[in-house]
Amino acid sequence: MSAEENKFQGAVPIIDCDIHPNPVRKRDLLPYLDDYWRDYMIASKFRGHLPTVDFTIPVNGGLRADSKVPEGGPACSSVDFFKKQVMDEYNYSHAILFTDGTFFISGAPQREMATAMAPAYNEWLIEHWLAKDSRLFGSVLVAAQDPEAAAREIDRVGGHPQMVQVGLGIHSPFGGWGDPRYYPIWEAAVRNDLVVTFHLTVGPTGLFKSGPIGPPRYFVETQSTHSLVFQSQLANMVFSGMFEKFPGLKIAFIEAGFAWVPGLTYMMDTQWRAVRREVPWVKRPPSEYIKEHFWFGTQPMIEPEPGDRKHLEQLIEMVGSDKLLFASDYPHWEFDSPVAALKGLNKQTREKIQYYNAKKLFGLPEPVLINN
């Protein structure tokens, strides 16, 4: 780490809320499957059943060119290399992991397969990542295609001391996330004191198959508009009244940015005042539910022109400086370095985003290692 970066980091470390570990091989998941699904996956060679991205992704398949593990294996498949390349480089105290399996499980059309694979990913994550470093924290991966089974999986592993959230893709299998059929998932999350974190989704029902006007033609089009589904889901959750039923539910949106939040909040408040009789179960202005129940990842972080940093800080205050979580999206090519992403913010705002907000939201322990 350069002297300039050390000066920037100071004594306050980084909590990264968006790291994507991968198995070295899909076969690494086999020991955690029952006999039927183990044989099924071996026979199918994992092809055609777990959805794959069939969209042309430029720039090294969507990964940082330098993230491939030197000793072999895909990006972010080695705890030691991840710690060297990211945690040690940027003075991380904690990292919250979101397995790439989340994207595919969320978009899987076969609910039985998805429900079988989710626990396998969870057991793999616990054994191969969480057990190797107390600074690593995980997401309980569930298949929302079967909400009752998802709730059972949350109860099964949600009590693990390093599991801090339920991980879901932002695209819901049927209806918006405010639909009552998903209530068992929210009940289990609250019961286990876990944040529910929604991440950008790929696969047949996600990023590369749908958009506001149908399937996108270009990757750049997709990248520019993927926050729109987050906006739709936020409005659906609030207007469904789910937060009146689950007042303790905490929601995080990751990899959608946050610049859109003030505009959507204003529009929701305006429309609610005009037609609130349509949704009498929404007892307060939508902005109040958003402020109480939602947090937002920084990635992709807005990078204003030099000298315009004050506008970014104004935007942050409109969202709430206590509602933003630093997210790098490692090992993807859009990786946001905390040095570049947070540079220029005033000290209080920067430290909230890079550390204090996430520590409080997820109830994380005191750091084990801090570089002073």
Image: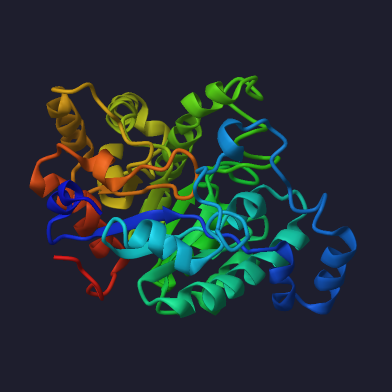
Q: Residue at x 62, y 64 (%)?
A: 23
Which quadrant would residue 255 be assigned to in this image? top left
Residue 357 in sight in this render = yes
**Quadrant of the drawing holding the C terminus:** bottom left
Residue furthest left in the image = 347
Which quadrant would residue 114 be assigned to in this image? bottom right
Tell me: residue 352, above or below residue 153: above
Residue 195 in sight in this render = no
All told, the count of numbered labels is 0
Q: Residue at x 38, y 47 (%)?
A: 328
The front one of 216 and 320 is: 216
Tell me: 219 left or right of 178. Answer: right
Q: Position of residue 208 (x, y in %)?
A: 64, 33
Q: Residue at x 42, y 43 (%)?
A: 335
Q: How is the image coloured?
A: rainbow
The front one of 96 and 213 is: 96
Q: Position of residue 217 (x, y in %)?
A: 65, 19
